[in-house]
Amino acid sequence: MPIGDYDKRITLLTKERGKITAFARGARRPTSQLLAATSPFSFGEFELFEGHSTYNLARASISNYFRELSEDPEKACYGFYFLEIADYCSRENNDGSELLKLLYQTLRALGRHALENRLVRRIFELRVLLVEGEYPNLYFCQNCGKKERLSYFSVQKEGMLCALCKEGADGIPVEESALYTMQYILSAKLNALYTFAVSQEVLLTLEQILDRFFTMRISHAFQSLDILKSITG
């Protein structure tokens, strides 16, 4: 955000110290070397010096500006939504490496045009829940503990139900392919996370579940999501 006539206040997600707020002096001047580095989606190395109560940005070496996102309004909206989630979930003086790696891989996937934006969003949301330790149980029935015939997802019980235990519960039907997809998202290595496509039926199931479960576990109103919804309908 702008500060004064020429400065900026920026938020960095770092692997060493989690979320950092810093001032970039003169970054809004057209001739400033920090002008491009303090734009959204800038990934690289930032050199800061620590003052009494804040950090100040001295220089930056950017390895990826994700320009393909800024050239596509819809992708930019998805990207800002992912940034806002990362901002909300990250903490100061914590290890931010896992969330940073996930965010970087997600923005790369968003810019490659290989996957639907809708799918990239749902993969990111579910994986964020894993990072936060708020992920659902997808491997056995929340009532009886059986691993067979898992065919319903209960938001209230925060996981899967078998066909026998579904009676009287508020369950979302889940086909085997959708269940496998969610299990894969939680278990896959980061470099293999955005390497698959799904049917529209599976995607709709993911949307049904995460629209309710993600909102319940991450109880925050994201302004960027409202903008995204107004663009994508």
Image (cartoon, helix red, strand yellow):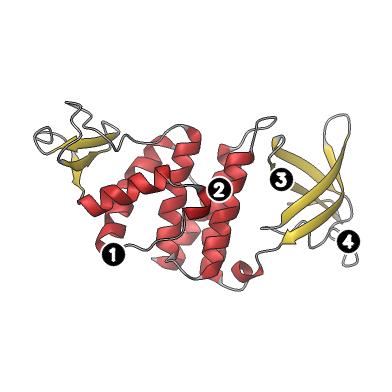
Which element is circle 4 on?
Answer: loop
Q: Please state which amino acid type lies under the numbered disc 1.
A: Ser
Amino acid carrying label 2: it is Leu
Q: Is any atom of residue 211 visible in this view?
A: no
In front: label 2 or label 4: 2
Residue hosting label 2: 102
Separation of disc 1 and disc 2 at Cα? Answer: 24 Å
Q: Which residue is mark 1?
A: 199
Q: Residues within 10 Å of mark 3 (few under 14, many from 20)?
A: some
Disc 1 packing (10 Å; few <14; some 14–19; many ≥20): few
Q: Which quadrant: the C terminus?
A: bottom left
Instruction: Tell whether label 3 touches label 4 (CB within 8 Å).
Output: no
Image x and y of residue 157, in percent: 26, 31
Lower sequence index among marks 2 and 3:
3
Report the residue marked by disc 3: 12
Q: Is residue 135 above or below residue 202?
A: above
Secondary structure at numbered mark 3 = strand
Number of residue marks: 4
Residues marked 2 and 3 touching at CB (< 8 Å): no
| Residue that label 4 marks | 33
